[in-house]
Amino acid sequence: MTLLNKALTIAGSDTSGGAGMEADLKTMEELGVFGMTALTCIVTMHPTTWEHSVYPLPMDLIEKQLVTAIEGVGINAMKTGMIGSPDLVELVAETIDKYELKNVVIDPVMVCKGCDLILAPDAAAAIKKLLLPRCDIITPNTVEAAYLADMAEVKTVEQIKEAAQKIVAAGAKSVVIKGGERLSDKAAIDIFYDGQEFVEMAEPKIYPSYNHGAGCTFSAAITAGLANGLTMKDAVLQAKAFVTAALKHGFAINNIVGCTNHTAYKKYGA
Ligand code: PXL
C-alpha cells in the first residue's frame, strides 16, 4: 500500500485558481503530497474590473476543519496563507501549541502585489507576535520582512540579510525573504537564513511576469518538501526550483491576470 505524506493549508480560496488554497493544493499534489485545507475565507473577483471581494468564514467552521485535518487525519506539515483577523491568528497559534505541530510554515500574507500597504494591521501585528516565534520558517516578501524586522525599508541584499537576522533573533527558527519584483536587481533573489548560514538563491527575472500566486506556490512547495522529510534548506531549494519553473511557464488566465503554472516543474523540470 502506498502511503502519502500529508500537509494542511490554513488559507483562503482564490476562486480564480492561481493563489490561495488552490495554489497550495496544486503544488502539494505536484510534489506528491496529500493536501488538506482549513479554509479561512473565499475571495471572488468581479469578471471585468477584477475587484476582489473577501468573504470570511465563521470561526467555529475554521476550528472544525482544523480538528478534521489534524485529529481526524493527521499531518506531517502545515502552512498558513490568508489569515486576516487577530482572532484567527490566535486560533492558529493555539492549534500549533495544542497539537505540538511540526514543520510549521508561515506565509505572512500582509500585502498584495503592486501595493506596499499592510492590508490588515491588527492581523499583521498578531502574526508578528504569535506566529513568528512558533514557526519553523516564515516566508515574507521585502515589505513584510521590513515590518517583521522593525526596519524602515528592505530594498537591498544587505538589508535583506539584516532583516533575516532580526527575524531569527525575534524567534523564527528560519526565514526566507523573497526579493522578487520589489528588489531593484536584474535577478530574482531570495535569501534563506537559519541562524547559521545564508543561502542566496538568484534566478534571472522572468518576463512577462505571470506571477499571481507565486508566493503561495513557494510556501506550499516548502511545506510539501518538509512533509516529505526534506531538511529545511533542501525544501527551500526545491521550492525555489518549483516556483522558477512555474514562472517560466506562467500564463494569462484572462486579459487581466497571469498565473504561475503549477504543472511546470513536474512536466518540464527546473
Ligand atoms: O497571493 C495572495 C493571496 C492569498 N490568498 C488568497 C488570495 C491571494 C491573492 O489574491 O486571493 C485567497
Image (tube, grey):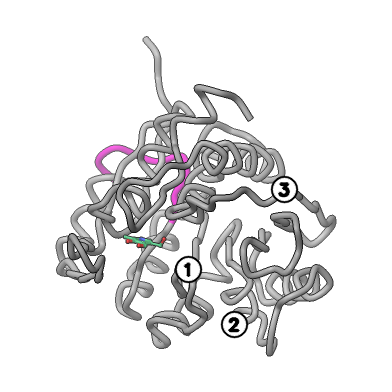
Q: Which amino acid does label 1 sit on?
A: Lys
Query: Which callout, 3 or 1, points at the residue further toward the start of the chain?
Result: 1
Magenta-colored stretch includes residue 74: yes
The answer to whether residue 178 is left or right of residue 61 is: right
The answer to whether residue 28 is left or right of residue 202 is: left
Q: Residue at x 20, y 61 (%)?
A: 42
Q: Can residue 70 be seen in this view?
A: no
Q: Where is residue 3 in the image (x, y as percent from the top left)?
A: 40, 20
Q: Which of 107 and 68 is in front in this view?
A: 107
Secondary structure at badge 3 equals: strand
Marker disc for residue 204: 3
Tell which tag, 2 or 1, sits nearer the viewer. 1
Magenta-colored stretch includes residue 93: no
Q: Mark 1 points at which residue?
A: 113
Q: Quadrant of the C terminus?
A: top right
- What is the magenta range? 71-79
Marker disc for residue 147: 2
